[in-house]
Image: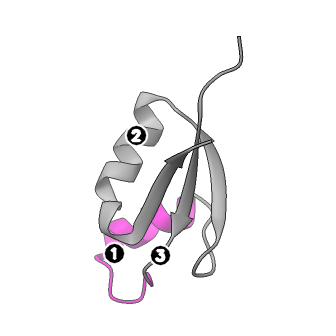
Amino acid sequence: MAEKMLKVTLIRSKIGAVPRNRKIIEAMGFHKLNQTKTFPDNDSTRGAIRKIAPYVKVEEA
């Protein structure tokens, strides 16, 4: 069975973000606004998304 995936879109700029959150955004591979990435739905991904929740939109893929 295929693993569940999450579609994450950066909707707010990381310019005004707290440095720790900015590093999380960069580690997830976001460079531009409205950029979308796909990640596996697991605890580590959910934790990172929870930290940067005001900056991203999450959908199930």
Mark 2 and mark 3 in contact? Answer it, CB < 8 Å: no
Q: Residue at x 45, y 84 (%)?
A: 13
Mark 1 and mark 3 in contact? Answer it, CB < 8 Å: no
Determine the CA span between mark 2 and mark 3: 17 Å
Determine the CA span between mark 1 and mark 3: 17 Å
Percent across and percent down for residue 43 are: 41, 30
User: Where does the C terminus fall, quadrant-wise?
Assistant: top right
Magenta-highlighted residues: 13-27
Q: Residue at x 43, y 35 (%)?
A: 44
Q: Is residue 38 inside the magenta stretch?
A: no
Q: Residue placed farthest to the bottom in the image?
A: 15
Local crowd at mark 2 within 10 Å, few (<14), some, or many (≥20)? some
Mark earlier in primary sequence (1, 3): 3
* Amino acid type, label 3: Ile
Question: In this figure, which residue is indicated by the disc labeled 2?
Answer: 46
Q: Residue at x 51, y 49 (%)?
A: 59
Secondary structure of the residue carrying numbered label 2: helix
Task: Give residue 19's mark.
Answer: 1
Nearest to the observer: residue 7 or residue 47: 7
- Which callout, 2 or 3, points to the residue nearer the camera? 3
Q: Residue placed farthest to the right in the image?
A: 2
Determine the CA span between mark 2 and mark 1: 19 Å
Mark earlier in primary sequence (2, 1): 1
Residue 26 relative to residue 36: left or right? left
For the stretch drawn in magenta, what is the main secondary structure? helix
* Amino acid type, label 2: Arg
Secondary structure of the residue carrying numbered label 1: helix
Secondary structure of the residue carrying numbered label 3: loop
Mark earlier in primary sequence (2, 3): 3
- Which callout, 1 or 3, points to the residue nearer the camera? 3
User: Where does the N terminus fall, quadrant-wise?
Assistant: top right
